[in-house]
Structures are given as C-alpha cells and as structure tokens.
Amino acid sequence: MQLIRVSSYEELSRKAADIISAQVILKPGCVLGLATGSTPIGTYRQLIERFRRGDLDFSRVTAFNLDEYLGISPEHPQSYHAFMQEQLFRHINICPRRCHVPEGCAEDPRAFARAYDQAIAEHGGIDLQLLGIGNNGHIAFNEPGDAFIKETHVVSLKKSTIEANKRFFTSIDQVPTQAITMGVGSIMQAKKVLLLAEGPVKKDALEKALYGPICPQMPASILQLHPDLTVICHVDG
Ligand code: GLP
C-alpha cells in the first residue's frame, strides 16, 4: 500500500487527478471504475481542466460506476447518473455509450446486476478503481455486514449511510433506503485501486480500514489485501 498524506483538499484532488491522468495517458483505452460522493468532485474538476487544456483525451475510455440508488430514475437530480453527468461526463469527450452506471430503475435489478458484472468482465476488468469511504467504512454501497459480497447486488442502506447522505436531499425520508452496488469482487480485481479520504469525519473509518482486522463489519478493510492500493488522505483537519 502507498499512503499519501496531504495537507488540503486541493492537494488531494490534484494528486488523485495525477494518478487518473497517468492511467489514461498510459492506456488510452483503459477501463476506469468511478465513484460518487463529495470527495471525488475536486478530482473530477481537475480532470475537466486538464481535458480543456488539451492534456487528456477520454475518447477511448470506458467507465463503470460503483453504485446507484434503487428506485431512482437517471433523470432524478440526486441520482448518481445525474451526478456523473454534472460532475464529469458532460464536460469531457468520453463516449456516452461507454459510461456505465448501475440502473436504479431496472425492471429486474438482480438480472441487471449479473449483466453489469458480465459487462465489466467482458471489458477485461477495471484498470483503475477510484473509491471514497463511508463514515461507517463502506466502499461503494458495500455496507457493514456479516459477509463480503463479491457480485454486484441490491443492498439495504444502513441508518448511518442514510443519515450521512440526507444532505443531498430535501429531507431524510427522501433518501432511498436501497441501492444497487458493485460488490467487492470487481473492486478487488481492479488492477489498481485509488482510495480517497477527505475530512476528520473519515479518520476513524480509514484507520480501522487500513490497520484493523479484515472483516465485513468494516468493508474497506478488504482493501488491505489489494496488491496495488494507493490511499490519498486529508483527515487531520
Ligand atoms: C456514498 C457512496 C460511496 C462514497 C461515500 C462517501 O454513500 N455510495 O461510493 O464513497 O458515500 O461519500 P462522500 O465522499 O460524500 O463522503
């Protein structure tokens, strides 16, 4: 594991964008695993700037997002589809048909989940997986539980996650209670993983994830087993 401690959110975002840029430059047809949440917004801004300067070309890149709320349409302003369009996709030259985000409104979410994993596998897996971490140690929407789930699956969100994500909705009862998420299988099979942790609120989860026991009650702890994990953190205020 490579742990990079930085002293500002700006620096975290620049360094994360450096790593993603290097991936896209070295392998223009790479597969990126992308994340939502507040943490990667600065990274995406950096990537957009670099694209506008002519330093990055996303025309051959394929993206697979980690997760989506269940029962929410892609047009819903708080959907992760809308988030990715707004924060990244519509500002760069990535091909829309190469942008994959799990379907929150799939008629059969379980069948969709199987097809999503198959599509990732058909693309040869993920080259670089970008991750945030939840206050409770979740990665994507792999919530603390009794077992690690490998495949893309439907999950019931923990109270702590609903509480943490209510800031994006008008009220807590607007927050969906279920989501569809990539499992830890595709994440752990990614060739590289880049985990970002921003803010003192993430300090405890990050420490437990990186140095505590590897257990499903702390989903991010499985990353200790990843052979190429880079962590960029700014958790000391
Ligand atoms: C959400 C997402 C995760 C994200 C996490 C942290 O629930 N499903 O992929 O890493 O929350 O979000 P934030 O960066 O806003 O703290």
Image: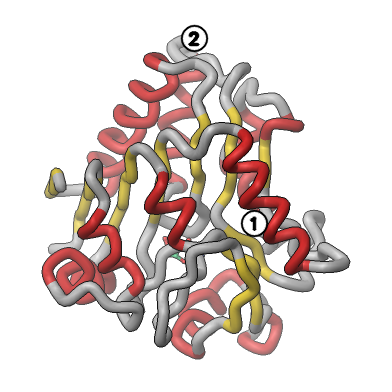
The percent position of residue 67, horizontal first and vertical second, equals 59, 60
Q: Position of residue 234 (x, y in %)?
A: 20, 55
Q: Residues within 10 Å of mark 1 (few under 14, many from 20)?
A: many
Q: Is residue 219 left or right of residue 94?
A: left
The earlier-in-sequence mark between 2 and 1 is 2
Q: Report the residue marked by disc 1.
A: 80
Q: Is mark 1 within 8 Å of ligand 1?
A: yes
Give the residue type at disc 2: Gly
Other residues around mark 2 within 10 Å, as few (<14) / some (14–19) / many (≥20): few
| Quarter residue 223 falls in | bottom left
Task: Give residue 176's mark.
Answer: none
In the image, is the residue at mark 2 within 8 Å of ligand 1 by its beta carbon? no
Q: Which mark is residue 54?
A: 2
Q: Where ligand 1 lies, by image quadrant?
A: bottom left
Seen from the viewer's position, the closer of residues 24 and 44 is: 24
Label 2 residue SS: loop
Q: Residue at x 50, y 43 (%)?
A: 33
Residue 139, placed above or below residue 7: below
The residue lying furthest to the top in this view is: 54
Answer with left or right where residue 94 lies relative to residue 159. right
5 shown above or below 184: above
**Residue 146 lies in what quarter of the image?**
bottom left
Q: Which residue is located at x 41 percent, y 80 percent? A: 147
Is there any visible trace of residue 200 in the rendered image? no
Residue at horizontal 59%, vertical 62%? Answer: 152
- Three-letter code, disc 1: Tyr
Res. 177 in view: yes
Q: Residue at x 67, y 49 (%)?
A: 101
